Image (spheres, helix red, strand yellow):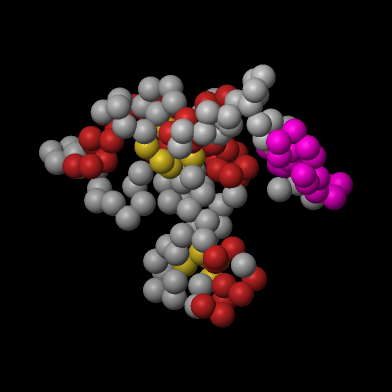
Amino acid sequence: MFNASGPLHHRRPGALGAALTDDRLTVTLIADGVHVHPAVIRLVWRAKPAGGVVLVTDAVAWRSARSSDRGVAHVDGAPRLPDGTLAGSSLTMPEAVRGAVTAGVDLADAVTAASTTPAALLGLADRGAIAPGRRADLVALDGGLRVQAVWCGGALAAQPPAGNGE
């Protein structure tokens, strides 16, 4: 929502108004505080029913160290082209969850938007929840919502060095 879209106008709500008011639609949101203001993040969560929001990163190749070779610079928390236009994001999914929580979204709702809801939309019935018969793809976060360990298919796949979560 809101990324490269027309504005939400009180007389012509357009696609954004339709997405916010039609409970059959699930919306995606870049919760970095740059693409979407924290107050609008809260507004979206209040407008949509449970499971109606998916967190996305919109992260692109600009996360690489070579981004400056392409004329992209990180300015005010996001990659931008020389003219100031947003060039995707450098957001990670744990940062998206943190951004939603910082904006006032309940932690359980933010985690659902990063895991259960997207898995369901993609028809991945074996993912998105901790339950018997599921793949056991898990991410352990600390109190600051930084990655502490990752399991894929129930096997430990990654654990950052001490003090270097994310």
Magenta residues, start to end? 144-163
Residue 155 in percent (x, y) is at 78, 37
Horizontally, residue 154 falls left or right of residue 83, namely: right
Horizontally, residue 143 falls left or right of residue 93, namely: right
Residue located at (67% from left, 35% from top): 137
The quarter of the picture where the N terminus appears is top left
Label total for image: 0
In this view, which residue lies farthest toward the top?
A: 132
Above or below: residue 10 compared with residue 7: above
Above or below: residue 109 compared with residue 97: above
Q: Is residue 18 magenta?
A: no
In this view, which residue lies farthest toward the bottom?
A: 69
Residue 93 in percent (x, y) is at 58, 44
Above or below: residue 146 compared with residue 53: below
Q: Which quarter of the figure has residue 8?
A: top left
* Nearest the eye: 156 or 71: 156
Residue 75 in percent (x, y) is at 52, 65
* Nearest the eye: 152 or 56: 152
Q: Is residue 148 visible?
A: no
In this view, which residue lies farthest toward the right?
A: 162
Residue located at (34% from left, 47% from top): 2
Q: Which quarter of the figure has residue 140?
A: top right
Q: Is residue 147 magenta?
A: yes
Q: Is residue 4 visible?
A: yes
In this view, which residue lies farthest toward the front?
A: 133
Residue located at (74% from left, 38% from top): 151
Residue located at (69% from left, 30% from top): 136
Residue 69 in percent (x, y) is at 56, 80
